[in-house]
Amino acid sequence: MELKLYDTYERRPRPFASLAPGHAGLYACGPTVYDYAHIGNLRTYLFGDLLRRVLQLNGYAVRHVVNITDVGHLTSDADAGEDKMEKGSRRTGRSAWDIAAFYTAAFQRDLERLRILPPTIWARATDHIPEQIAFIAEIERAGFSYRTADGIYFDTARLERYGHLARLDIAGLRAGHRVELGDKRSPTDFALWKFSGDERRQMEWDSPWGRGFPGWHIECSAMSTRYLGALFDIHIGGEDHVPVHHSNEIAQHEACHGHPPARYWLHGSFLRLADSEKMSKADGSFIRLETLIERGFDPLAYRYLVLGAHYRSKLVFSWAALEAAQTALGRLRLGFYRLPAGGAPDPAYRERMLAELNDDLNTPRALALAWELLKSGLPGAVQKATLAWLDEALGLGLEAWRPETIAVPDAVLELVEARQRARVEKRWADADALRAAIEAEGFSVRDTAAGPVAAPAG
Ligand SMILES: Nc1ncnc2c1ncn2[C@@H]1O[C@H](COP(=O)(O)OP(=O)(O)OP(=O)(O)O)[C@@H](O)[C@H]1O
Ligand SMILES: [Zn+2]
């Protein structure tokens, strides 16, 4: 069955065909590790994980590369402002190297809790400085760069198709540009290498152009080429990468190779908060996965919530929506758990589910089919096997889940029995005292039709 993916470059869904049969190369722009990831960032990595899983379900061996931006991402996309890492260092009082290691580990832990498969290769920008310098030197040799007082810049005017990915209106941008250009020739030109100058930086390197650090876009060009080759299958990221970061990656690549680095470009839509345009690390007020956990949510409830919206449609986060996702996930888990094992997937359902997933990763419709299947009347073992198969794409971990059984200590069970005897014998004062004793042990007792049930209080 044909896999169709919506390609931002061509603005249309296209049948996916890989360069090498049975193999798919996938590059995802990773986080800037100057702070924790917010759940918006995590939506983008859930989208990447879904794409990878669907490729795998279609029989592809996926080589999945994710970079870690630990240098060179400035607070402004216009090459002004300071390095986010140096800023993070000042905020925390720790070195830029320390916070890079700390927030990388925190990010990887978030991915694990969301059951996002680890990439084949993690590529850290600061581990690939020579590759970045070599890439810039190639751009320079091809005649696409110029030098200013503060760095080496890419000359976007040299490329006829600059900004094609974003359908940028270059003439309009140039005419309407009121902001100080500095020494840049055009507002769309961007830094390949920035000089340290008089600034004292924690992260800086020698280069043929002077001591400094790489611009943000060059790392992805250098590392994707190193690990996936000069032309690979799919490049992904959040929708904000279309007009600047990915447009610039493409420009760098075209200067050296005469074509974009990837054959398909996919972009995930942002998660938004009801009352704001976007969720940003930069403004300091954001919701982390940890925030959800502290409020009693299972991280996979967030995964379920994200799967309930198509990756290219807007998703507005609310606590009520997360609550509903947690309830639905709970029902799905329990439904799955109660089904008997030992069956094989139902071919008709499997085909319909794959058709939805292969239709540009339509998870809302695939989830709807999961619920339909549970009411289908098919043998339980067949339902279970079909859901387990689907879950390879959804990644909800249905097979690993077990209902929580909370052990009630014997001493508490004895108090519960004593209270029950007191109630049968209508010794109400004793029963009340025993209830207080149970509560003092940190448990509560509830009287049900099947008898009293003790559970941890709270
Ligand atoms: N609200 C959001 N929803 C979905 N994805 C997002 C959101 N914000 C950022 N992303 C994506 O998260 C990924 C990591 O982004 P990055 O670490 O550079 O942080 P950022 O949140 O964009 O930073 P900042 O808020 O400082 O601009 C990128 O692919 C980006 O497109
Ligand atoms: Zn990138």
Image (cartoon, rainbow, N blue to C red):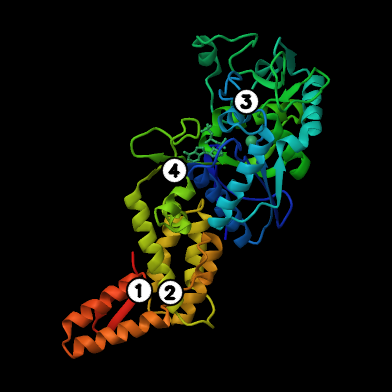
The kind of residue tagged 3 is Asp
> Does label 3 or label 4 sit earlier along the sequence?
3
| Quadrant position of the C terminus in the picture | bottom left
Q: Residue at x 44, y 39 (%)?
A: 286
Mark count:
4
Q: Which mark is residue 406?
A: 2
The kind of residue tagged 2 is Ile
> Does label 2 or label 3 sit earlier along the sequence?
3
**Percent position of residue 293, x then y:** 45, 54
Q: In the visual, does 374 lie left or right of 20?
A: left
Q: Residue at x 59, y 52 (%)?
A: 109
Local packing at callout 1 (Cα closer than 10 Å; few below 14, some 14-19, many 20+) is some
> Does label 4 or label 1 sit earlier along the sequence?
4
Q: Which residue is mark 3?
A: 83
Q: Residue at x 34, y 52 (%)?
A: 321
Residues under numbered marks 1 and 2 in contact, where contact means CB atoms less than 8 Å apart:
yes
SS at circle 2: loop
| Quadrant position of the N terminus in the picture | bottom right
Q: Nearer the viewer, mark 2 or mark 4?
A: 2
SS at circle 4: loop
Local packing at callout 3 (Cα closer than 10 Å; few below 14, some 14-19, many 20+) is many
> Does label 1 or label 2 sit earlier along the sequence?
2
Local packing at callout 4 (Cα closer than 10 Å; few below 14, some 14-19, many 20+) is some
Q: Is residue 68 visible?
A: no
Query: How far apart are the two marked residues, 4 and 1, measured between alpha carbons?
Result: 31 Å
Indicate whether 453 appears above or below 297: below
Q: Which residue is mark 1?
A: 455
Q: Which residue is mark 4?
A: 287
